Image (spheres, rainbow, N blue to C red):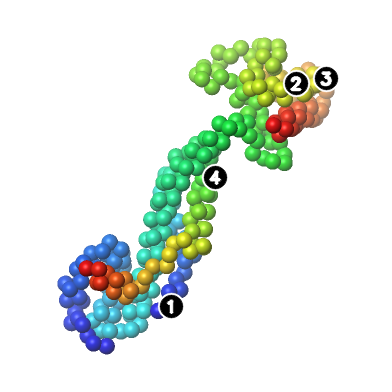
Amino acid sequence: MDKNIDKEKILLEALSMMNPKIKKSLLNTCRSERDDLEQEIKLKVINAVLIGKIKTPPTFSEFKKKFNKMI
Amino acid sequence: MIKQYKSLSEYRKRNIELLSQPIVKSFFDNNPGNLILLEASEVYGIEEATDELDKRFVEHFFLYRLIAYISSVSQNFSKYYDKSKKKQTERFPLLINKSDEVSEGEMLDYLLYNNYDLNSHNTTDINLESSSIFELVVDEKLYKALLKLNKKELEVIKLLIIDQLKQIEVANLFNESPQSISKLKKNALLKIKNEYKKG
């Protein structure tokens, strides 16, 4: 099975879903630094996807096989 | 393909642990369509359903991993970032962010910052009627930088920043145009900035 998934689409979805969490973490720094911090966090996440830091997961079939071997 | 399961419920019974695994569980809970694909794949052996199920699962799992990563980064990196910014401010208290141009607003803010005792909650206690700007300056570097200014530049800076006069008021005081006052101020701030750059 070709594991060619649309990573960019998923990235946008994840960033949108996690926006409240990111906003909350900005409270950890002073007001003047918050914009920069937000950008840094998002940049880190985007970079992680682009360089393949977030590994492509197994398919359901593969996952099933591994799981059943373990139990 | 050999049919292993007679129905979806049989599949569920025989694969309880797998279907309880959090990622798998959320995969089927979030989208009931995936259960239909599961049935088509496991009960009826339809290859296209298996392929589609596999693809959707990869996407779901990838999203899951990404969310976990974002959560971790937001939490941990924000604390690290704040810590390192605080250290930076400690080491370089009057660091000017804009490298090429002097942002007058920023410069004035920093100069004002130095003239107020931040430990004192009541800043109106400070007597601003002192005749010399040097009496108010606490920071050694700033003091040295101010020594580089000529008399007029010092006066203008003092009147604009300490006494908080408007440029036009200062212009009237010196009997000069507001533009020349603005120029004086700009040059004075540039001189101070250059002194700081020298280190």
Discs 3 and 4 lie in a common subunit: no
Residue A23 x, y percent position in the rendering: 44, 46
Residue B157 x, y percent position in the rendering: 72, 23
Residue B137 x, y percent position in the rendering: 65, 19
Dot 4 corresponds to which residue? Answer: A36
> Dot 1 falls on which chain?
A
> Dot 2 falls on which chain?
B
Q: Secondary structure at mark 1?
A: loop
Residue A64 x, y percent position in the rendering: 28, 72
**Label 1 to label 4: alpha-carbon separation:** 38 Å
Q: Amino acid at mark 3?
A: Asn
Mark before the other along the chain sequence, 2 or 3: 2
Rendering quarter of residue B152? top right
Dot 1 corresponds to which residue? Answer: A2
Dot 2 corresponds to which residue? Answer: B147
**Label 3 to label 1: alpha-carbon separation:** 80 Å
Q: Is residue A59 left or right of residue A45?
A: left
Dot 3 corresponds to which residue? Answer: B175
**Is label 2 in contact with label 4 (beta carbons under 8 Å)?**
no
Q: For the point 58% across and 20% down, which residue is it?
A: B116
